[in-house]
Structure formats: structure tokens, C-alpha cells
Image (cartoon, grey):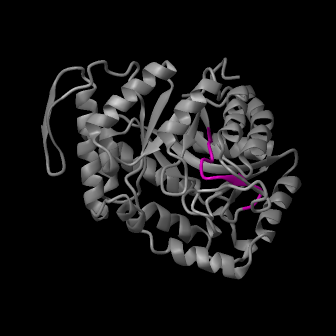
């Protein structure tokens, strides 16, 4: 089992700080050249720089987020496909906001336009307010039940034959994708709740978890493997992490400290208050890692080289691998030994950090035989 490396495409904006960087403070209508210091708007030219860098550095794909504060993942990535040759796009989307038959058709079209460079990241959604903003009023567990039906329809429609389905959330008669995608996109899926596990076991190709300490990741892997085996399936595993890799550990930790210098107790408290309203079990697990949000720098290294500082002010992935290139490679190897195959990585700013990782860590992983030949 080799390692698959992926990077992140910051379609909500980028920058040199952990404080909210997205360029939509004015609602996204205007983006003046003189905007907030250190913030980079997610225009197509900047995103193309990141995509080209990721391709050059040997990353297999880039993950795009989904939601109010970022550009639409489908439209943005299909545009960026015209700026790249091999890079794949791990497109995040929410089942509750579009028809499964339409999603299957979009994926098929995407595969033909990009010559097979689509991967799918299914985001069920853990923020009720965000879901309602898109017209979705189901509660947490029913959203996962709907996702299960959604993926059943998508896979059924991809058969190339008329497909009928009647469930609690979808009623499809003769659903059809006349030209199925080739190859079929792999489905990445995450969720830490009891409602999420069976959906992952039944439908996911890759179960994706945020970067918890290795022992907690192992518990999740064992859980999903057991559920998948009960259904006669196997599932592969991935982890979503930030990275902060430098020539020496001292340089890396100094950069982490600089990121914290931008924060104050009020900023952290406001972010934690907002994040605490989440319905996402995975997000609550992230919040628990840094001890409740206090800006206590001594408590943020929660496992060797695993730093929870990002989660003080950012939702989603809240941990980073911090250290020398060898330290970061060691931690990736540790997760890999547990069964993690896909590593979806990011850093602030994404352009510069892609080079730090790609030029510093990737050669070490190659030397250890963890990357497939020809990755770079």
C-alpha cells in the first residue's frame, strides 16, 4: 500500500494568518486590490498558481471545499483543469442541495471534459445554520440517511441502464446517465457519528477523517473496517491534515508560534463560541483536542509533532503536522502503518507550504518506498 498525497485548494481565500482569511468580508461582491493585509482573494489566477504547483510537486489531487464562503467547487475546478494536465480534483459537494441523478450526470460530463480527473468528496453537513441557508432543514441523523440514499441512486444511475429507486428521500423512475463516467470517480466520505459509520461502510471508497492523534485514528479505522466487513466490502482510509514543515524543527515551531502571535483571547473565544454550536461529531472531537479553546501554547502539541493550534480559530481540520521534514515524514509513516493511504494536506499560505512539503518531505517519502514510482 503506497501513499497518495493530495493538497488543498483555498477557494475561500488564502493568507499568512490563521485568522479568517476568506476574501468575502463584503459579501464577495467586490474585492479591492487594497484588501486585508496578508489575505489573498481566490481569483482564478492565484488558484491556478496553487494547482500548477501541486501538479509540479507530485500531488495527485487537490481538495476543494464547499459552502457559503467559497467559490463553487464544480465550476472552479473544471476551469482549473484547463490550466493543468494530470492533476485530479477532489470536489466537495453536499447531497442535500442537488438531485442525485443530476450529480451523476455532472460527474460523467466532468470526467469526459477532464479525461478522468474527478474524485468526489461527499459532505453530509454538520452546521444546521449553513444547511438551512441552502434550504436543507433535515436534522443530523436524517441527513446521513439521505446521503445513503443519494449515493445508492448515483451508483445505480452510473450503471448506464434506467434505474428505479424509491426511498424516504428520493423517488427516481428510470434515472439514467446515458454515458456513464469513465472511470467511475472514487467517493471520499467522512463522518464520526454513529449515523455516519454505516453510510461510509456501505458507500465510501475512501473514509476520510480529520487529523486526530494516531490512536484515535486507529479506533476509527477499526470501526469502519468492521462495519464494512459486515457488508462484504473493504474501505480505504485517508486523513485530512495541515502541515508546517521546515529544514529544522526549530524553524517549523517558530513559524507555528508566529501564527499564534496573530491571535488574541477575544478572537479565540469568539471562534470557539461559534464552533461550539456545531452538530458535527467530528468537529466536536477537533474542539476537544486543544482543551476548550484557551490560548495555552503548552497544551497544543497533542501528540508528537501534531499541533492543535489551527483549531483555535478554524473549523474543519484543526491540526497540523509540525517539525522538520524528517519529523513530518515520520508522522506520515506512522499514520500509514495504521492503514492510512490518502493524505489530504494544506498549509498557510497554500502556495508556499506546498513547496515546503513537496521539496522537503516528498523526497523522503519516496526514499522510504512509500510513494509509487513516477509520483514526481
Whether residue 299 is visible: yes
Q: Decide which of 327, 286 is in the foreground and name it.
A: 286
Q: Decide which of 238, 230 is in the foreground and name it.
A: 238
Counting every numbered tag in the picture gives 0
Q: What stretch is highlighted in magenta?
A: 7-17
Whether residue 214 sits left or right of residue 185 in the image: it is right
Query: Magenta region's main secondary structure?
Result: loop
**Picture residue at 41% right of the left edge, 57% below the top:** 192
User: What is the x, y in percent for residue 170?
Assistant: 18, 45
Q: Does the magenta stretch include residue 218?
A: no
Q: Quick check: 106 above or below 171?
A: above
Q: In which quarter of the image is the C terminus?
A: top right
Q: Does the magenta stretch include residue 12?
A: yes
Whether residue 224 sits left or right of residue 352 in the image: it is left
Whether residue 130 sits left or right of residue 198 in the image: it is right
Q: Quick check: 116 above or below 147?
A: above
Q: Decide which of 198, 66 is in the foreground and name it.
A: 66
Q: In which quarter of the image is the N terminus?
A: top right
Whether residue 340 is visible: no
Amino acid at each position: 500500500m503506497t501513499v497518495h498525497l493530495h493538497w488543498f485548494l483555498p477557494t475561500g481565500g488564502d493568507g499568512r494568518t490563521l485568522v479568517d482569511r476568506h476574501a468575502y468580508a463584503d459579501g464577495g461582491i467586490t474585492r479591492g486590490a487594497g484588501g486585508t493585509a496578508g489575505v489573498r482573494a481566490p481569483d482564478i489566477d492565484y488558484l491556478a498558481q496553487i494547482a500548477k504547483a501541486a501538479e509540479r510537486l507530485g500531488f495527485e489531487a487537490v481538495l476543494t471545499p464547499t459552502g457559503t464562503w467559497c467559490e463553487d467547487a464544480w465550476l472552479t475546478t473544471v476551469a482549473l483543469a484547463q490550466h493543468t494536465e494530470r492533476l485530479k480534483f477532489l470536489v466537495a459537494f453536499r447531497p442535500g442541495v442537488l438531485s442525485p441523478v443530476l450529480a451523476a450526470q455532472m460527474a460523467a460530463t466532468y470526467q469526459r471534459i477532464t479525461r478522468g480527473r474527478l474524485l468526489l468528496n461527499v459532505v453530509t453537513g454538520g452546521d444546521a445554520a449553513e444547511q438551512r441557508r441552502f434550504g436543507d432543514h433535515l436534522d443530523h441523523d436524517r441527513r446521513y440517511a439521505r446521503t445513503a440514499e443519494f449515493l445508492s441512486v448515483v451508483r445505480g444511475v452510473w450503471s448506464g441502464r434506467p434505474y428505479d429507486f424509491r426511498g424516504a428521500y428520493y423517488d427516481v423512475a428510470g434515472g439514467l446517465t446515458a454515458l456513464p463516467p469513465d472511470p467511475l470517480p472514487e467517493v471520499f466520505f467522512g463522518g464520526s457519528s454513529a449515523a455516519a459509520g454505516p453510510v461510509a461502510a456501505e458507500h465510501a471508497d475512501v473514509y476520510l477523517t480529520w487529523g486526530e492523534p494516531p490512536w484515535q485514528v486507529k479506533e476509527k479505522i477499526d470501526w469502519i473496517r468492521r462495519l464494512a466487513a459486515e457488508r462484504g466490502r473493504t474501505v480505504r482510509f485517508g486523513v485530512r491534515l495541515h502541515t508546517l514543515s521546515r529544514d529544522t524543527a526549530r524553524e517549523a515551531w517558530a513559524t507555528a508560534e508566529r501564527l499564534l502571535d496573530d491571535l488574541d483571547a477575544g478572537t479565540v473565544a469568539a471562534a470557539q463560541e461559534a464552533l461550539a454550536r456545531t452538530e458535527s461529531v467530528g468537529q466536536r472531537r477537533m474542539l476537544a483536542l486543544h482543551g476548550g479553546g484557551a490560548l495555552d501554547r503548552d497544551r497544543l502539541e497533542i501528540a508528537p509533532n501534531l499541533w492543535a493550534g489551527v483549531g483555535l480559530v478554524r473549523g474543519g481540520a484543526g491540526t497540523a503536522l509540525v517539525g522538520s521534514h524528517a519529523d513530518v515524514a515520520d508522522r506520515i509513516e506512522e499514520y500509514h502503518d495504521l492503514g492510512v493511504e490518502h493524505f489530504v494536506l494544506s498549509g498557510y499560505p497554500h502556495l508556499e507550504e506546498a513547496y515546503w512539503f513537496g521539496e522537503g518531505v516528498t523526497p523522503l517519502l519516496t526514499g522510504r518506498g512509500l510513494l509509487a514510482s513516477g509520483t514526481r
